[in-house]
C-alpha cells in the first residue's frame, strides 16, 4: 500500500467490557486473515481465551486503530489499579503468555512503528502506567527509540534461551555443546540403557489432549508440586487457561506432547507448540525417583533431534526466559526478551517513573557493595 505512510493515525472508541468483544470479532478476523503469516497468539480466539481466564469482564479495554478511515489494528489491553495509580497492560501473564507481537493489517507495518504506537497510546486518557507488549530479539530486535514528548519509558531486557536448530542432531551435539555437557548426556544415556526397556513417545492433536492429564500428573509429582508451582497447584483460572490453550493448539495442529517411558511407565514429559518457524518449549516435568539419569534433559535432547529430523519448517527452539539452572547449557545463540513500561506525564505517572529510577539505582548500589574484590574477599 504505497500511500500508507502519509495517512493519519488515530485511536477509536474502545471496547470497555468483555461482553462487547463479539462486536469486533469479524473486523479482528479480517485483519488477521489479511496477512499470510500471523502468530496464533494474535488471533481473536486466543485473545478471547486470555481475557476469559485472566481479566475481569469490566477490565477489558480494546482500542481500534485507524489510518484515516481504515481500521488497521487493535490494541488489546486491560485496566487495573494499584493504589491510586491507574494501569493499562498488554496481555502478558508471566510464563503463561510470553508470546509477543501486535496485530497489524497487511501493508501498514511501516506506519505503525514503535514511536507511532507510543504516540497513539499517549492519546488514550485515564492511565498513569502502561505495561507494554514485549518482543523477542530473534523475531526483530527492538529499536532504541526514545519515548515521545508525552511519555517516559523504561526498557527492560532479560535473557531468553533459544537453540538455533542445526542441519543434523550430530552437528548440534558435537559443535554446539560443551565437552562436559556431551559427557553428561552420554553418561545419562548409558544409565538409561540399563533398564529392560525404554521408549520416547510423541503425540499431537487429540491424542496429545487425551494424554494431557498424564503430563500434569508428572509435572505435579516432584518439587513443582511441593512448591505449588505445578499447573495442578495453580489457581483455578490458570488451570482453566491451560485446558483451553491445549485445545486451541490441538485444533490448529501445532500441539506437541513428548514422553520418556521406562518399562512402559512415563518418567518425564514435555509440552510445546509450533508458531511459525519456532517451537516453543512450554513446560517439562519428571519423576524425581528417576532423577539419577536426568530424564528431563534426555527428553529435551530427543525433542531437538525429533524436530531436526521431522519438522524442517522449524528453525529455532525457544525455552523462554528464566534459566532454572539448566537452559544455558544447551543454547547456541544469545537471545533476549525486551519489554517496555510507559509512564504518562500525569502526576501519578511522573511519580511512579522517578520512584522506579530510584529503586534501580538503589539496587545497583547494593549489588556493587557485595561484589567480591579481586582477591576474592567481600
Image: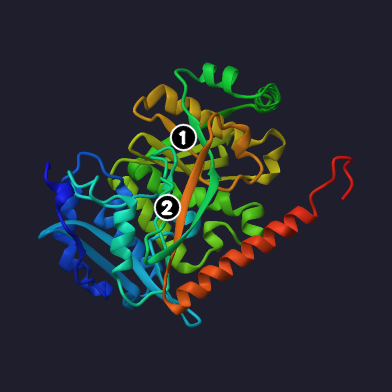
Label 1 belongs to which residue?
317
Q: Is residue 284 left or right of residue 292?
A: left
Does the image show residue 46? no
Q: Of 51 and 238, which appears nearest the observer?
A: 51
211 vs 78: above or below: above
Question: Marks 1/2: CA distance?
Answer: 19 Å
Q: Of 28 and 212, which appears nearest the observer?
A: 28
- Residue 25 point in image, percent of width and height: 18, 61
Single out the residue that lies furthest toward the front: 149
Please tell me whether mark 2 sits on a helix, a strand or a loop: loop
- Residue 2 point in image, percent of width and height: 12, 41
Q: Quadrant of residue 225?
A: bottom right
Frontmost of labels 1 and 2 is: 2
Q: Choose the circle earlier in sequence order: 1 or 2.
A: 2
Q: Residue at x 63, y 33 (%)?
A: 329
- Residue 307 point in image, percent of width and height: 43, 28
Q: Residue at x 32, y 64 (%)?
A: 121
- Residue 208 point in image, percent of width and height: 40, 43
Neighbours of disc 2 within 10 Å: few (<14), some (14-19), many (20+): many
Label 2 belongs to which residue?
134
Colour option used: rainbow
Q: Of 338 and 204, which appears nearest the observer?
A: 338
Q: Determine contact: label 1, label 2, CB under 8 Å.
A: no
Q: Quadrant of the N terminus?
A: top left
**Labels in figure, total:** 2
Q: Quadrant of residue 280?
A: top left
Q: Residue at x 38, y 40 (%)?
A: 140
Residue 114 is tagged as none
Does the image show residue 210? yes
Q: Is residue 7 left or right of residue 48?
A: left
Please tell me whether mark 1 sits on a helix, a strand or a loop: strand
Q: Residue at x 23, y 72 (%)?
A: 15
Amino acid at each position: 500500500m504505497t500511500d500508507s505512510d502519509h495517512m493519519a493515525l488515530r485511536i477509536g472508541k474502545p471496547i470497555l467490557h468483555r461482553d462487547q468483544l463479539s462486536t469486533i470479532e469479524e473486523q479482528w478476523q479480517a485483519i488477521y486473515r489479511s496477512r499470510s503469516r500471523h502468530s496464533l497468539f494474535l488471533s481473536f480466539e486466543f485473545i478471547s481465551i486470555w481475557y476469559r481466564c485472566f481479566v475481569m469482564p469490566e477490565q477489558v479495554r480494546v482500542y481500534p486503530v485507524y489510518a484515516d478511515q481504515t481500521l488497521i489494528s487493535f490494541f488489546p489491553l486491560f485496566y487495573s489499579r494499584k493504589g491510586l495509580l491507574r494501569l493499562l497492560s498488554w496481555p502478558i501473564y508471566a510464563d503463561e503468555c510470553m508470546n509477543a507481537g501486535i496485530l497489524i493489517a497487511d501493508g501498514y507495518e511501516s506506519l505503525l512503528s514503535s514511536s507511532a504506537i507510543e504516540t497513539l497510546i499517549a492519546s488514550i486518557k485515564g492511565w498513569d502506567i502502561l505495561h507494554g507488549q514485549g518482543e523477542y530479539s530473534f523475531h526483530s530486535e527492538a529499536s532504541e527509540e526514545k519515548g515521545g514528548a508525552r511519555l517516559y519509558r523504561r526498557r527492560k531486557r532479560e535473557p531468553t534461551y533459544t537453540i538455533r536448530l542445526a542441519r543434523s542432531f550430530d552437528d548440534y551435539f558435537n559443535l554446539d555443546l560443551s565437552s562436559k555437557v556431551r559427557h553428561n548426556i552420554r553418561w545419562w544415556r548409558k544409565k538409561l540403557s540399563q533398564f529392560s526397556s525404554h521408549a520416547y513417545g510423541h503425540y499431537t492433536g487429540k491424542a496429545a489432549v487425551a494424554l494431557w492429564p498424564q503430563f500434569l500428573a508428572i509435572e505435579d509429582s516432584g518439587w513443582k508440586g511441593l512448591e505449588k508451582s505445578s499447573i495442578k497447584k495453580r489457581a483455578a483460572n490458570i488451570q482453566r487457561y491451560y485446558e483451553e490453550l491445549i485445545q486451541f493448539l490441538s485444533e490448529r495442529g501445532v500441539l506437541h506432547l513428548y514422553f520418556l517411558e521406562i518399562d512402559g511407565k512415563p518418567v518425564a514429559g514435555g509440552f510445546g507448540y509450533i508458531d511459525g518457524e519456532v517451537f516453543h518449549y512450554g513446560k517439562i516435568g519428571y519423576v524425581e525417583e528417576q532423577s539419577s539419569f536426568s530424564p528431563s534433559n534426555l527428553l529435551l535432547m530427543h525433542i531437538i533431534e525429533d524436530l531436526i529430523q521431522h519438522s524442517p519448517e522449524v528453525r529455532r527452539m525457544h525455552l523462554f526466559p528464566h534459566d532454572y539452572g539448566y537452559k544455558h547449557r544447551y543454547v547456541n545463540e544469545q537471545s533476549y526478551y525486551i519489554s517496555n513500561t510507559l509512564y504518562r506525564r500525569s502526576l501519578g505517572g511522573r511519580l511512579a517513573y522517578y520512584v522506579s529510577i530510584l529503586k534501580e539505582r538503589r539496587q545497583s548500589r547494593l549489588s556493587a557493595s557485595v561484589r567480591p574484590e579481586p582477591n576474592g574477599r567481600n
